[in-house]
């Protein structure tokens, strides 16, 4: 079943990329919700409802699904609402990661420094183009930075190493947001979506599958 859902997700993402390339709004409204529904299905089938960690990850995925739908529109208000939905999703992820503990305290310094630098450089790059979005984007960037740090600090079950599905999923999500930001505030072009969308969906599928720890 998981292989079938993964194949369906990949097909929906391919259709979404085609819709973005052709600027086919009707196909976007079919393909994007279909692709996003896949990571929710993976979480549920992986046992998300059976633990507080899984429930919080599932809540994050549902918020992200809502964000994906709002971002289909190019209207500034829809983008702002979508960004708010994603911020709530990241807060749910932070709750999930802290719910299972963050035992890797010896690794705290490096992730904090790297994410702080990434957030600073990203905001410096985007700042001249943000206009009225400066404060919402700053808050969102700080939230996703905390989410990534929490993911890296989350230990694997019965191991002293990071829980890689969570860490890679969170980092991939954060990097994919660079494509979204560039497309929205710097230069709108298909290339942003060409690499950003596949990375985003791969990251979300990893986070969804992580509930089966």
Image (cartoon, rainbow, N blue to C red):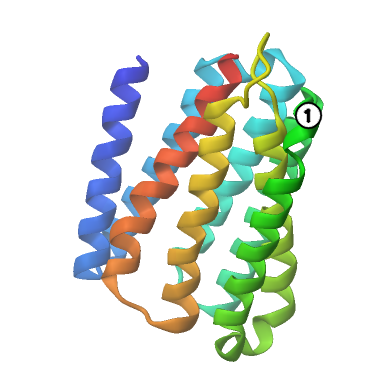
Kindly identify the residue that appears in the image at 40 percent across and 39 percent down.
Answer: 202
Residue 141 figure quarter:
bottom right
Q: Nearer the viewer, residue 33 or 64?
A: 64
Q: Nearer the viewer, residue 177 or 29?
A: 177
Residue 170 sits above or below residue 19 on the image: above
Residue 163 sits above or below residue 167 on the image: above
Query: Number of numbered discs present?
Result: 1
Kindly identify the residue that appears in the image at 54 percent across and 32 percent down.
Answer: 207
Residue 75 sits above or below residue 53 on the image: below
In this view of the protein, can residue 92 be seen by the observer?
A: yes
Residue 118 figure quarter:
bottom right
Q: List x then y, in percent, for residue 192.
A: 34, 67
Q: List x then y, in percent, for residue 100.
A: 77, 22
Kindly identify the residue that appears in the image at 44 percent across and 42 percent down.
Answer: 36
Q: List x then y, in percent, for residue 32.
A: 38, 50
Callout 1: few (<14), some (14-19), or many (20+) C-alpha neighbours within 10 Å? some
Q: List x then y, in percent, for residue 10.
A: 28, 38
Kindly identify the residue that appears in the image at 32 percent across and 49 percent down.
Answer: 31
Quarter of the image that includes the C terminus? top right
Quarter of the image that includes the N terminus? top left
Q: Is residue 84 left or right of residue 14?
A: right
In this view, the residue farthest toward the top is: 158
In this view of the protein, can residue 87 be seen by the observer?
A: no
Q: Is residue 146 left or right of residue 195?
A: right
> Which residue in the protein does label 1 denote?
102
Which element carries disc 1, helix, strand or loop? loop
């Amino acid at each position: 079943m998981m292989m079938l859902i993964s194949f369906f997700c990949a097909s929906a993402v391919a259709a979404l990329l085609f819709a973005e390339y052709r600027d086919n709004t009707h196909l976007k409204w079919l393909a994007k919700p279909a692709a996003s529904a896949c990571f929710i299905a993976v979480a549920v089938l992986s046992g998300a409802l059976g633990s507080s960690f899984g429930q919080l990850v599932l809540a994050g995925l549902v918020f992200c699904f809502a964000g994906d739908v709002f971002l289909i529109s190019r209207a500034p208000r829809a983008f702002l609402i979508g960004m708010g939905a994603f911020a709530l999703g990241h807060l749910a992820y932070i709750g999930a990661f802290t719910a299972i503990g963050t035992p890797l305290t010896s690794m705290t310094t490096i992730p904090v420094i790297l994410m702080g630098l990434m957030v600073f450089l990203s905001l410096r790059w985007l700042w001249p183009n943000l206009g009225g979005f400066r404060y919402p984007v700053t808050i969102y960037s700080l939230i996703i930075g905390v989410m990534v740090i929490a993911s890296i600090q989350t230990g694997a079950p019965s191991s002293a190493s990071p829980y890689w599905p969570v860490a890679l999923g969170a980092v991939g999500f954060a990097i994919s947001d660079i494509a979204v930001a560039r497309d929205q505030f710097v230069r709108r072009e298909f290339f942003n979506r060409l690499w950003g969308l596949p990375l985003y969906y791969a990251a979300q599928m990893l986070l969804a599958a992580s509930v089966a720890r």
